[in-house]
């Protein structure tokens, strides 16, 4: 049993908010005047509590349109450098975060961190399916594992289309900093009768950009990255609860959870801290 009673609720809420606003763990340690171990322990506790909270609360979602995508990052070292890395831990290498959002409420319905293969695609899409109470129009990119995963999870009970972006040659002299220009898109109807007007992955790609900008572990071309796979998962769990329940979406003017009718009020980070405290009172044999 563990209970972090050395820091007041407001202080812990401040630490978690800074982590979700793009600050690194060490910068949070300096700004909040606490040890890096304190920040790390709080992140682990928050991640566990937030993962359980998401599993419990994001259920029976009434959605019409869902978009799915994957966002890349890495743990400890990029995959090409793991073999030469010193004492690389389990989980080192490329790390993919799968996200599925409701296109109307912008709610992150499902997420999963791991590899970008068929096994994870199947686990991710099945989790998404279990959280949704309605027939949906689903759009993914052209990543092939989605095809079998959607068939396995939904069968014929889905209107599914693939949107494949077509890219030109890499821009000269800027290959590391500028993406190739998108020169067109190719849409393919896979299952059911999806509305062509809503075959899009724009919303989920924007949510993933928000995740990258608001989460230091996803920042490109810096030395900011996860040293441990588990901590990466904990941060995504914390970020998801913050994004769905605490952060007001600028366009919606409410949180995604409010827009999806999962709650009728705005949450704040102190409630996340209280959630952590409640979870810490449950004996480990019951909570694990």
Image: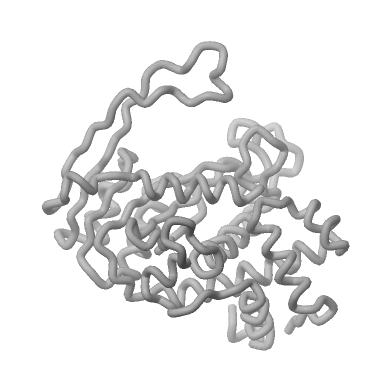
Q: Residue at 63% across / 58% down in the picture?
A: 20
The picture places residue 54, in percent across and down from the top left corner, at 49, 71
Q: Is residue 5 left or right of residue 286?
A: right
The picture places residue 2, in percent across and down from the top left corner, at 75, 81
Residue 218's image quarter? top right
Q: Residue at 40% across / 59% down in the picture?
A: 106
Q: How is the image coloured?
A: one colour
In the rendered view, would you say 245 is above or below 160?
Answer: below
| Residue sitting farthest toward the top | 172
In the rendered view, would you say 160 is above or below 174?
Answer: below
Q: Residue at 63% across / 82% down in the picture?
A: 279
Q: Is residue 163 left or right of residue 49?
A: left
Q: Residue at 29% across / 53% down in the picture?
A: 149
Look at the image and tell me in which quarter the N terminus lies: bottom right
Look at the image and tell me in which quarter the C terminus lies: bottom right
In the rendered view, would you say 148 is above or below 286?
Answer: above
Task: Count all numbered tags in the image, as a single digit.
Answer: 0
The picture places residue 156, in percent across and down from the top left corner, at 14, 59
The picture places residue 52, in percent across and down from the top left corner, at 53, 75
Q: Nearer the viewer, residue 90 or 37?
A: 37
Residue 260's image quarter? bottom left
């Amino acid at each position: 049993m563990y209970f972090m009673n050395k820091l007041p609720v407001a202080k812990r809420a401040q630490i978690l908010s800074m982590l979700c606003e793009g600050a690194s763990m060490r910068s949070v340690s300096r700004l909040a005047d606490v040890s890096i171990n304190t920040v790390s322990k709080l992140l682990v506790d928050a991640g566990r509590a937030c993962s359980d909270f998401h599993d419990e609360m994001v259920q029976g979602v009434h959605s019409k349109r869902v978009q799915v995508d994957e966002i890349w990052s890495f743990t400890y070292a990029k995959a090409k450098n793991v073999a030469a890395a010193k004492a690389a831990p389990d989980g080192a290498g490329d790390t993919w975060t799968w996200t599925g959002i409701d296109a109307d409420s912008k709610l992150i319905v499902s997420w999963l961190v791991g590899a970008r293969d068929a096994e994870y695609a199947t686990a991710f899409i099945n989790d998404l399916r279990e959280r949704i109470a309605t027939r949906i129009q689903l759009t993914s990119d052209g990543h092939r594992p989605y095809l079998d995963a959607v068939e396995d999870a939904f069968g014929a009970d889905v209107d599914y289309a693939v949107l494949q972006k077509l890219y030109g040659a890499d821009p000269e002299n800027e290959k590391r900093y500028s993406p190739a220009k998108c020169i067109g898109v190719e849409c393919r109807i896979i299952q059911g009768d999806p509305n062509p007007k809503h075959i899009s992955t724009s919303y989920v790609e924007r949510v993933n950009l928000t995740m990258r900008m608001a989460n230091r572990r996803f920042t490109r071309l810096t030395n900011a990255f996860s040293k441990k796979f588990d901590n990466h998962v904990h941060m995504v769990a914390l970020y998801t609860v913050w994004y769905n329940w605490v952060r007001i979406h600028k366009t919606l003017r409410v949180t995604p959870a409010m827009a999806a009718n999962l709650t009728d009020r705005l949450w704040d980070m102190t409630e996340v801290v209280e959630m952590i405290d409640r979870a810490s009172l449950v004996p480990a044999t019951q909570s694990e």
